Image (cartoon, rainbow, N blue to C red):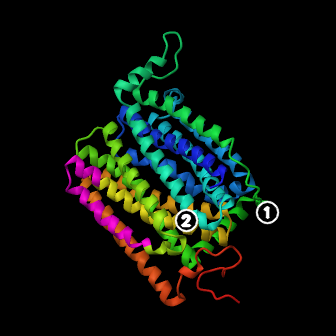
């Protein structure tokens, strides 16, 4: 791997670590404000909505500038959102509802993350050849998962009274920092990790990749995005990988919150301890990603699809386990299945998007689909909580949905193979050497 790849990894680690620690701190802040249970999914909803709304614009933005500069600018936006959350009480004093200030502040962080993502993933296709993408994605996903583990554990530690009590000593007798609660103390530390990520962003190398001058007219940007959207979905390889990654990220974001609720209701665990379970799940995802990188080349990426059906079945086992060793093992197993099938699919989608479109545009389409699924699944989950549906019923519904959806994707792939021929021979071919769409014959 080239040296710049490791700088990208470091920047991604600290930025993602802060994102995940901030989620735990934000949930704790809502608890301190006595917010209802259904408001917790709205945190992720507000964070995610920018990915959908900004999808037509973040791709061209990522391609218009060197991606290291894009990552620095968007990480700075995250810092601003984090500071808004830290000083929510001052903003609420202007006449705003405290709950909404917290939600909007986390939404600003999501705004920065939405603009950050196309640059983060798009730079991989500029820096590395196609045959390195599965390995690179495995490294990025494993590191991201590592940051999730560290982030949720860090968030859980920072909101503990024993730790936050020491942090509150920062509020000196003659200097009012505005830090008054454990959640606020945690957020004050998380800001520092965003700053560290920004410093690494400054040292990301310019790959030298340049794209045609990007369109600035919003209507034309939207039209171009629709064209990119249709192109990727009409491609027989693109549609399969896009369907899988869309389902994975929608299910993963929802499962993260389901696990926290399940730990509280089913295992009687407080938030600071429940956050460890999401870290254990993330550890399993990293393990699955590493295994996939070692044994699944890009040309065989479609062969991992059955793991998605199995994952849905294993998730449903959460309703019957209580012993902590079994709970930890189950979380690792679910995560490993997720990592095993999503990493090859993510690499295939990046490569196919690079062949058909451009780095920034293809990632923007991917983000739009994935986060639209997250919004839909979070809305359904919030609705389930609002009618007080038992968490075990939620889990069973969730597991059945994942298994049936993956079965549908596998059926579609097999149908494409019957109608259009073998897909594998179109994977891993350099740009310009393959038909525009799988299923077309070379002229």
Instruction: Answer with mark 1 or mark 2, whichever residue precedes in sequence.
Output: 1
Residue labelled with disc 1: 212
Q: Quadrant of the N terminus?
A: bottom right
**Residue 369 place in picture, x, y as percent:** 53, 64
**Residue 241 place in picture, x, y as percent:** 51, 70
Q: Can you say whether 443 is above or below 347 in the image?
A: below
CA gap, disc 1 to disc 2? 25 Å
What kind of secondary structure does the magenta stretch mostly adopt? Answer: helix
The answer to which quarter of the image holds residue 409 is bottom left
Q: Secondary structure at mark 2?
A: helix
Looking at this view, is 323 or 190 the one in front? Answer: 323
**Residue 189 place in picture, x, y as percent:** 50, 30
Q: Quadrant of the C terminus?
A: bottom right
Who's the residue at 67% across and 73% down the image? Answer: 430
Which residue of the protein is positioned furthest toward the top in this rendering? 174
Tell me if I can see residue 368 in this picture.
no
Looking at this view, is 106 or 169 the one in front? Answer: 169
The answer to which quarter of the image holds residue 231 is bottom right
**Residue 227 place in picture, x, y as percent:** 66, 71
Who's the residue at 50% across and 67% down the image? Answer: 345
Q: Can you say whether 120 is above or below 132 in the image?
A: above
Residue labelled with disc 2: 347
Query: Are discs 1 and 2 less than 8 Å apart at CB?
Result: no
Near mark 1 (Cα within 10 A), the count class, few <14, some 14-19 or many ≥20, is few
Looking at this view, is 416 or 300 the one in front? Answer: 300
Magenta-span inclusion, residue 305: yes
Q: Provide the residue span drawn in magenta.
A: 304-329
Left or right of 283 on screen, residue 268: left
Who's the residue at 24% across and 46% down the image? Answer: 265
Tell me if I can see residue 416 in this picture.
yes
The residue mark sitting in front, 1 or 2, is: 2
Near mark 2 (Cα within 10 A), the count class, few <14, some 14-19 or many ≥20, is many
């Amino acid at each position: 791997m080239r040296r710049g790849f490791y700088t990208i990894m470091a920047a991604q680690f600290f930025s993602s670590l802060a994102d995940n620690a901030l989620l735990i701190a934000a949930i704790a802040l809502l608890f301190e404000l006595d917010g209802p249970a259904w408001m917790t999914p709205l945190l992720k909803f507000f964070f995610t909505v920018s990915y959908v709304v900004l999808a037509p614009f973040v791709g061209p933005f990522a391609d218009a500038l060197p991606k290291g500069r894009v990552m620095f600018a968007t990480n700075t936006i995250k810092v601003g959102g984090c500071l808004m959350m830290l000083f929510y009480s001052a903003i609420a004093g202007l006449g705003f509802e405290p709950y909404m200030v917290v939600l909007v502040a986390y939404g600003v962080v999501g705004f920065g993350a939405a603009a950050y993502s196309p640059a983060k993933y798009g730079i991989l296709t500029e820096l590395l050849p196609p045959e390195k993408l599965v390995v690179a994605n495995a490294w990025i996903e494993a590191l991201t998962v590592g940051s999730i583990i560290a982030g949720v554990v860090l968030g859980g530690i920072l909101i503990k009274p024993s730790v936050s009590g020491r942090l509150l000593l920062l509020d000196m007798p003659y200097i009012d920092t505005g830090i008054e609660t454990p959640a606020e103390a945690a957020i004050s530390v998380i800001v520092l990790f965003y700053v560290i990520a920004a410093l690494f962003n400054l040292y990301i190398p310019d790959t030298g990749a340049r794209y045609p001058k990007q369109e600035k007219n919003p209507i034309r940007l939207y039209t171009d995005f629709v064209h990119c959207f249709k192109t990727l979905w009409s491609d027989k390889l693109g549609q399969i990988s896009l369907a899988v990654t869309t389902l994975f990220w929608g299910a993963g974001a929802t499962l993260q919150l389901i696990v926290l609720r399940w730990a509280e209701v089913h295992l009687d665990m407080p938030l600071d301890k429940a956050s460890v379970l999401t870290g254990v799940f993330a550890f399993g995802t990293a393990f699955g990603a590493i295994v996939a990188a070692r044994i699944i080349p890009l040309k065989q990426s479609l062969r991992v699809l059955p793991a998605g059906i199995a994952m849905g079945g294993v998730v449903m086992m959460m309703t019957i386990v209580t012993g902590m060793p079994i709970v930890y093992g189950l979380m690792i197993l679910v995560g490993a299945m997720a990592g095993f099938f999503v990493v090859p699919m993510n690499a295939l989608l990046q490569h196919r998007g690079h062949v058909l479109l451009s780095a920034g545009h293809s990632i923007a389409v991917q983000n739009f689909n994935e986060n639209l699924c997250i919004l839909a699944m979070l809305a359904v989950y919030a609705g389930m909580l609002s009618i007080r549906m038992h968490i075990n019923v939620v889990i069973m519904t969730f597991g059945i949905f994942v298994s049936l959806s993956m079965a549908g994707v596998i059926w579609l792939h097999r149908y494409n193979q019957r109608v259009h021929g073998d897909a594998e021979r179109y994977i891993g071919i350099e740009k310009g050497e393959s038909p525009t769409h799988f299923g077309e014959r070379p002229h």
